[in-house]
Image (spheres, rainbow, N blue to C red):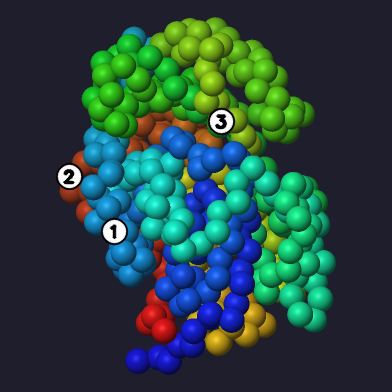
Amino acid sequence: MTKTHSLGHLHVLISGASVAGPALALDLLRYGARVTVVEKAPDLRAGGFAVDFRGHVHREVLTTMGIWDEIHARQTHMGRQTVVDADGRAVVDLPSEMMSGDVEIFRGELARIMYERTRDRAEYVFGDSIAALTETAEGVDVAFERSAPRRFDLVIGADGLHSNTRRLVFGDESRHLRFFDHYVAGFTVPNDLGLDRTGRVYSEPGRAVAIGNYDGDPDRAGALLVFRSGPLSYGHRDVAAQKRILAERFAGMGWRTPSVLKALEDADDLYFDAIAQVHVDRLAKGRVALLGDAGYGATMGGMGTGVAIVGAYVLAGELALAGGDHRAAFAAYEARIRRFARGCQKTSGNAGPFFAPPTERRIRSRNRMYRLLSSRPLAGFFRRLTEKAATDISLRAYPAA
């Protein structure tokens, strides 16, 4: 068995408490590291999109972390999603394995599981963020927006697609964000369709509306809107502007779109972003490294949550094997995770065109293809196809110190 070393001498600052941050905290605590997690939001963020895991690699990592059974206990049990026409008639059924993997859970629920297992052993600082980073021979001097300055041995940016840590250390996000000609939005709507852990998807050229019920609540559902567009200028925190964009882009669309736009007016949980990927030249610089979406993220369709969980497992394990030597550990982490992350990212490039094909002809072609892939003779092949990227890494054994 590979020998590991205690990380009790390391104090690691993790920026971000969504998924990647608490995952790394949980993994580092196994090796005795001191962990501080700083999160800009005032509290742990609830809700969010459902995220899924698939294949033996995800299962092995989650089992080692000790959270596989709890994820299953809180899973969505989401069933089939059905592509419909403007009258709501079924065109093609998409099997649950395609959209929901082996097990699916709300992002907020997953974060809560890991937070509850780490909050008594790690320090969480909510309502704050990193303002500046200065590396010295002894560590990293960190200035915060609100808290007093502190020194840490290492800093890990796990703060998402629009990572503040990445901006401070690796440069403006315009250098790293690759736009894929689509935008996505999500928010809560009334469950007027009476859905019970099922979903409906309606597409017109260049735009799509999906409505799904993931938790069995008879009154609520989630709406997903996707539309094709060139780059748009808007404030990431300007919700009113984002609602105006959606109202304009989806005006005149059929099926249930008018009622969805009506619900949008009063929605207080709107998520809006470009469909994009993060590409950086390297994942570490000095004592600072990037994890999850901050280093190799994709807005949707790239199995980003699974990649982040695996990335946290590898990063913590390599630090333990190297006895806390960040130079060796970061180099090994990047060497082991980069190809895997890139492979998973490739699956996200089709997310926009899948929901919102650019023409009626492309919509019909998509429907024919998925009708074929979801048929019984090809169901096993399709499952293996969706798992290929998620399992394309050989995990090292990282026994606890």
Residue drawn at point x = 68 percent, y = 74 percent? 153
Distance between the Cα atoms at labels 2 and 1? 29 Å
Q: Amino acid at mark 1?
A: Trp
Task: Give the total number of marks visible in the rendering.
Answer: 3
Q: Residue at x 49, y 20 (%)?
A: 204
Q: Is 277 located above or below residue 296 in the figure?
A: above
Circle 1 packing at 10 Å, graded few (<14), some (14-19), many (20+), is some
Residue 93, image x, y percentages: 27, 31
- Give whichever of discs 2 and 1 has the lower sequence position: 1
Query: Which element is circle 3 on?
Result: strand
Earlier in the chain: of badge 2 and badge 3, it is 3
Q: Residue 280, how many percent across, how many down?
A: 69, 61
For the N terminus, which image quadrant?
bottom left
Q: Is residue 57 left or right of residue 325?
A: left
Find the distance from the CA under tag 1 to the CA under tag 3.
Answer: 27 Å
In the picture shown, does residue 108 fall above or below 175?
above
Q: Nearer the viewer, residue 280 or 47?
A: 47
Q: Quadrant of residue 309?
A: bottom left
At label 3, which amino acid type do we have? Tyr
Say what amino acid the circle numbered 2 marks: Arg
> Residue 376 got which mark?
2
Q: Pointer 2: residues within 10 angstroms few (<14), some, or many (20+)?
A: few
Q: Is residue 357 visible?
A: yes
Q: For numbered disc 2, what is the local secondary structure?
A: helix
Q: Which mark is residue 271?
A: 3
